[in-house]
């Protein structure tokens, strides 16, 4: 698949490297062309000159920026994202990591409102960046939960997550992004307050069929 | 420990049986004395004549009723719950199981507001009733997530959950009840929409130390 990753930090870089290993064509963009180039070189991906250039031919556009940057990038890209599959991997944490900023809704629902003609899928937000290099624990794949209102978009993002080594679980409609952002907040909060290694991940065990 | 379980349905009955097996003294109350008696007999517990009688000497009071019944029971018990550790195992689902009724807050936070002198701990809501008979999967304990603002109360509820065979994870303050209610809603929704066996459970895998 042709994957555009907006963001050259840990999240974007980790996902890009995993996607390249899985055989996808990956383009990275960032605020600074230099950091996009560095992240792309490290991941074996291609750097794009701009966000608009990155998304142009992409089948999946991943928002892998800090949540606070999402609104501006969505505004900047605007119609370039019409009809595009947008995977929102962000978590709307406040500045002190003590709460979410989206009481009663979710980052993904807000993004879908801002981009009514994009096909927003919540994805990858519940997985720490470092796990992409090793998406299994004791030989069992971690779960990649996705949520969205566009079935075809969700199917493609799910196939992408499976190709990286995860077990994709379709959590339901975009409203379920609230659950995915809460489980991620819980995992982040546990690692921050207990000094864990930022490697813990979610798994739904027991019969899931 | 002396455990009072308010509610004689699947949740109350399953938890009571597990608590009796773990050696605790368990009292069950319900709207109908008959159903309390039936659930108590099945679990090897004692039936109480009323909710007030059940909570009188209890170290932990578990709300194991449908969420819609919580407000009335809390009003009925009122000061009987002053200083008591109240474990809220309810999930605030709407009538069609398609959403939660607590946008922007949680059932547990609402209960704490209604009972300012009780020590509310969110607990057991993220575990299906049927799991109490078998709290492990492939030899690994499922996780029991608890949240609350009273450290001593949380400690005791955590020890109780450990005694039943779970691995307790302290999710943080009572605000984290929102996360625990969302993860439970997600699991409920997945079982309802996919026809799963209502046995799936949450596990945080990878390094948690």
Image (spheres, coloured by chain):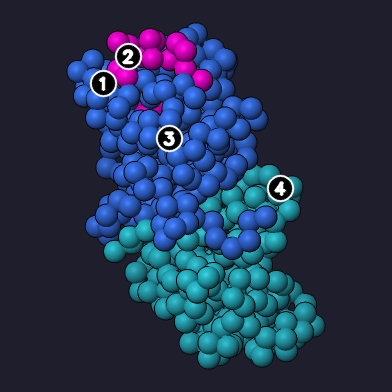
Chain colours: A blue, B cyan
In the image shown, does B116 or A30 lie closer to the viewer? A30
Q: Which residue is mark 3?
A: A22
Q: Are marks 3 and 2 on the same chain?
A: yes
- Read off the magenta span: A46-67
Q: Which residue is mark 2?
A: A48
How many residues crowd around disc 1 within 10 Å: few (fewer than 14), some, or many (20 or more)? many
Q: Nearer the viewer, mark 2 or mark 4?
A: 2
Q: Which residue is mark 4?
A: B193
Task: Find the distance from the CA under tag 4 to the CA under tag 1.
Answer: 41 Å
Query: Residue A126 magenta-drawn?
Result: no
Q: Are marks 2 and 1 in contact (CB under 8 Å)?
A: yes
Q: Output the chain of dot 2.
A: A
In the image shown, does A44 or B142 lie closer to the viewer? A44
Task: Find the distance from the CA under tag 2 to the CA under tag 1.
Answer: 7 Å
Question: SS at mark 1?
Answer: helix
How many residues crowd around disc 2 within 10 Å: few (fewer than 14), some, or many (20 or more)? many
Query: Residue A57 magenta-drawn?
Result: yes
Task: Find the distance from the CA under tag 3 to the CA under tag 1.
Answer: 20 Å
């Amino acid at each position: 698949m042709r994957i555009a990753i907006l963001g050259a930090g840990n999240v974007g870089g980790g996902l890009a490297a995993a996607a390249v290993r899985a055989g996808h064509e990956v383009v990275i963009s960032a605020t600074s062309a230099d950091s996009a180039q560095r992240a792309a070189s490290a991941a074996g991906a291609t750097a794009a000159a701009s966000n608009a250039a990155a998304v142009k031919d992409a089948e999946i556009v991943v928002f892998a920026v800090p949540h606070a940057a999402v609104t501006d990038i969505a505004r900047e890209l605007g119609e370039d994202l019409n009809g595009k599959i947008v995977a929102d991997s962000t978590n709307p944490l406040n500045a002190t990591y003590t709460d979410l900023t989206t009481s009663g809704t979710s980052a993904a629902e807000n993004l879908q409102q801002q981009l009514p003609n994009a096909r927003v899928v919540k994805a990858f937000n519940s997985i720490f960046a470092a796990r992409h290099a090793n998406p299994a624990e004791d030989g069992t794949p971690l779960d990649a939960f996705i949520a969205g209102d566009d079935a075809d978009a969700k199917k493609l993002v799910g196939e992408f997550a499976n190709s990286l080594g995860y077990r994709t679980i379709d959590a339901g409609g975009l409203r379920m992004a609230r659950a995915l952002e809460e489980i991620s907040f819980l995992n982040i909060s546990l690692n921050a307050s207990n000094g864990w290694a930022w490697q813990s991940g979610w798994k739904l065990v027991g019969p899931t069929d």
